[in-house]
Image (cartoon, rainbow, N blue to C red):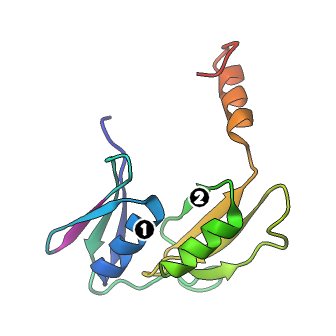
Amino acid sequence: MVRQVIVFDAADLHAESTFWAGILGGHVFEDDDWHSVIDAAGQWRIGVQLAPDHVPPDWPHGNPQQVHLDLHVDDPRAAHEEAVALGARLLQPAPDLDAAEGHQVYADPAGHPFCIGWGHPSREALAAFVADRLGRREPG
C-alpha cells in the first residue's frame, strides 16, 4: 500500500474540500468532479467526490453516518474554534473541555460526523502500547 485516502461524498465540493484543507493546514487541488486535499506535509489525505444527490447523515438518530474521523489534539479549545470557523457544526459537546480526556462530535459542511478528542491515549501511551504489543522494549 502506498497511500491511504479517505473519500467523502459531497454535493458542494468546494465547501467540503476547503473545510478539510483548513483542518489539515493543507491545500485543495480541484477537478470538475473530484477534489484532492493535500495536508501541510504534502501528503494526499482526503478526496472529495461530487455526489449531487448526497443525503447528509443526521447523527445520532436520523440518516446513518457512512464514515467518521477521529482527530486527536492537544488543545481542544483551539481545535474547536478552528473547526467552527472553518464551517463545522457542533453535534455533541463534551461535558468539560478542561477534563484530562474527552471528545466532541461535529459535522463537516456536508454533514459527515467527526470527533475531536484529547487525552486518550497520549502519544507516549500509544507508543508504549504499540511497542509492548509488538514485543519491543522501546517504541518505534
The residue pinned by badge 1 equals 22
25 part of magenta stretch: no
Q: Which residues are magenta?
A: 33-37
Magenta segment's dominant SS is strand
| Residue lying at 42% horizontally and 68% vertically, measured from the top left | 22
Where, quadrant-wise, is the N terminus in this rendering?
A: top left
The residue pinned by badge 2 equals 70
Q: Is residue 53 left or right of residue 130?
A: left
Report if residue 88 is visible in the image: no
Quadrant of res 94: bottom right
Where, quadrant-wise, is the C terminus in this rendering?
A: top right
Residue 133 lies, with reference to residue 19, above or below; the image says above
The answer to which of marks 2 and 1 sits earlier in the sequence is 1
The amino acid at mark 2 is Asp
| Residue lying at 64% horizontally and 67% vertically, measured from the top left | 78
Residue 113 lies, with reference to residue 72, above or below; the image says below
Q: How many marks?
A: 2
| Residue lying at 67% horizontally and 14% vertically, measured from the top left | 135
Query: Decide: marks 2, 1 in contact (CB < 8 A)?
Result: no
| Residue lying at 21% horizontally and 68% vertically, measured from the top left | 34
